Image (cartoon, rainbow, N blue to C red):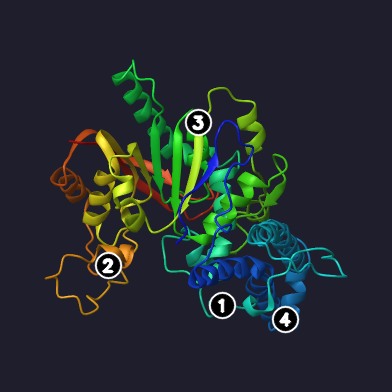
């Protein structure tokens, strides 16, 4: 994976250097184009799954039935037309992400003619590399974020567009602040502990997603560094932070991909403006901002090296620890990169991402302990309960300064839906000893 790149400091008007800028690894380039192609395919696959197949099923009913449903108060065909329009609105954001990604990669093949005059096009050899899932139930996918289950590329593109609701809409602030405010309070408490400190505070955010927490930390004066392994998230965050021209530039409809559990159609078609702020203007108008940096890499491989030893005052792990197949390795690397007395701030549930994909030992017999170079692909996995996580954190060289449980933590949740999937999250602040 690419090394880290500086994103923002007080003398730079770029928020988030494109992770695409310095790609040399052919395999990494393939992954990037798979992500770009999946955003490019968003409109086609969404129209197919959300409306085309439903129109076919609609007309397969007896004529008297579909004629009844075509009229008010149902007007089902109008509902499908509205769905297509909402998909097109989402697709505008998806295309913008693709365009910015291609520009960052230095692709120079603008299209000629048609509605997409002068638009950058994905090179022919990469068209279609993102394969859509077939025969799946969208209703099961839309209530979890892209990192929570093993999704195909096109599923991840769809989920990333929905993720903008949480990270970059005004209405999503209530969701994200459940977690982010606890990070800010923990860091404020650290400042109280060291009132005479003058050097800047460095905060690492693994699993940074669309980058809102990293941005907000920079806005508050911290040297914030995000780490993300998903190129869907990296491309999307790079676009919104670097290229969004104004607040409310895009309109998204996050609830249109399923037709289940809606109380009325207006709820299904609820729209939101993103971003809620213009990132560059917001930082330009602020005083005492910090700096931002983003690293596209496997967390274990990058932050376990000598360069990152004792480097950070805090690690803000939001909905992150349960992405570990082996939490011991995560905690080992977190402790390694924290300064003495530094803190791990955790907020999230324990939806162990690898539970249904338990890795074999791949020929590894456990006798050779030097498998650290594989990162998250290292053999071995285990799922802990909440009390076991706390016990393990203590075992790994931390003390628990604060613990909080039963925190209501929705994640890209439609509050009007008849199905509410809300985590009862845990929060702790653990100090390296």
Q: Earlier in the sequence, mark 2 or mark 1?
A: 1
Where residue 65 appears, as percent x and y from the top left, is 71, 77
**SS of the residue at dot 1?**
loop
In the image, taking residue 83 as reference, residue 204 lies left or right, namely left
Secondary element type, mark 4:
helix
Query: Is the residue marked by circle 3 packed among few (<14), some (14-19), or many (20+) residues within 10 Å?
Result: many
Give percent across and percent down for residue 387: 18, 47
Q: Is residue 404 visible?
A: no
| Image position of 118 (left or right of 148) | right
Alpha carbon separation for disc pair 3 and 2: 35 Å
Mark 2 or 1: the one toward you: 2
Q: Label 1, on which residue?
A: 131
| Residue 114 vs residue 76, the one in the foreground | 114
Residue hosting label 3: 290
Instruction: Tell me whether circle 4 and circle 1 mark residues in contact (CB < 8 Å).
Output: no
Say few, some or many: other residues with alpha carbon within 10 Å of mark 1 (under 14 / 14 to 19 / 20 or more): some
Which residue lies under the disc numbered 4? 59
Tag shown at residue 378? 2
Mark 3 or mark 4: name the one nearer the start of the chain. 4
Per the model, the C-alpha gap separating discs 3 and 1 is 40 Å
Which circle's residue, 4 or 1, is located before the other in the chain? 4
Viewed as shown, does residue 199 lie left or right of 386?
A: right
Q: Is residue 292 above or below residue 152?
A: above
Q: Residue at x 85, y 65 (%)?
A: 117
Nearest to the eye among marks 3 and 1: give it.
3
Residue drawn at x 23%, y 50% as measured from the top left? 332
Query: Residue 308, can we see it?
Result: yes
Please determine whether, in this image, residue 107 is positioned above or below residue 395: below
Circle 2: element type? loop
């Amino acid at each position: 994976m690419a090394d880290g790149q500086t994103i923002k400091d007080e003398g730079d008007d770029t928020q988030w250097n494109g992770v695409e800028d310095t790609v040399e690894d052919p395999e990494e380039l393939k992954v990037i184009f798979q992500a770009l192609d999946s955003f490019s395919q968003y409109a086609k696959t969404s129209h197919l799954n959300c409306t085309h197949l439903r129109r076919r099923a609609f007309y397969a009913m007896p004529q008297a039935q579909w004629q009844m449903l075509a009229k008010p108060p149902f007007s089902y065909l109008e509902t499908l037309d509205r769905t297509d329009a909402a998909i097109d609105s989402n697709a505008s954001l998806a295309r913008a992400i693709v365009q910015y990604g291609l520009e960052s990669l230095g692709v120079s093949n603008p299209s000629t003619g048609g509605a997409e005059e002068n638009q950058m096009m994905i090179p022919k050899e990469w068209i279609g590399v993102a394969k859509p899932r077939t025969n799946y139930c969208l209703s099961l996918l839309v209530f979890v974020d892209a990192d929570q289950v093993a999704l195909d590329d096109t599923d991840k593109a769809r989920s990333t567009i929905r993720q903008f609701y949480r990270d970059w809409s005004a209405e999503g602030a209530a969701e994200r602040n459940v977690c982010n405010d606890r990070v800010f309070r923990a860091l404020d408490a650290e400042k109280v502990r060291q009132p005479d400190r003058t050097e800047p505070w460095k905060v690492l955010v693994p699993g940074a997603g669309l980058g809102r927490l990293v941005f907000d930390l920079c806005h508050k004066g911290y040297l914030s560094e995000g780490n993300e392994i998903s190129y869907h998230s990296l491309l999307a965050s790079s676009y919104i932070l670097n290229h969004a021209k104004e607040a409310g530039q895009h309109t998204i409809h996050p609830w249109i991909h399923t037709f289940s559990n809606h109380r009325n159609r207006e709820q299904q078609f609820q729209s939101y403006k993103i971003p809620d702020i213009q990132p560059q203007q917001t930082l330009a108008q602020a005083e005492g901002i910090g700096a931002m940096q983003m690293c596209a890499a496997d967390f274990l491989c990058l932050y376990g090296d000598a360069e990152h030893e004792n480097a950070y005052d805090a690690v803000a792990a939001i909905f992150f620890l349960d992405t570990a197949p082996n939490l011991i390795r995560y905690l080992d690397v977190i402790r390694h990169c924290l300064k003495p007395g530094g803190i791990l701030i955790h907020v999230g549930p324990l939806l162990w991402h690898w539970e249904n994909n338990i890795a074999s030992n791949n020929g590894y017999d456990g006798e050779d302990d030097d498998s650290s170079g594989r990162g998250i692909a290292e053999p071995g996995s285990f799922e802990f309960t909440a009390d076991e996580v706390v016990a393990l954190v203590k075992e790994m060289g931390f003390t628990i300064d604060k613990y909080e449980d039963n925190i209501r933590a929705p994640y890209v949740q439609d509050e009007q839906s008849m199905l509410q999937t809300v985590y009862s999250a845990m929060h702790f602040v653990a100090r390296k000893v």
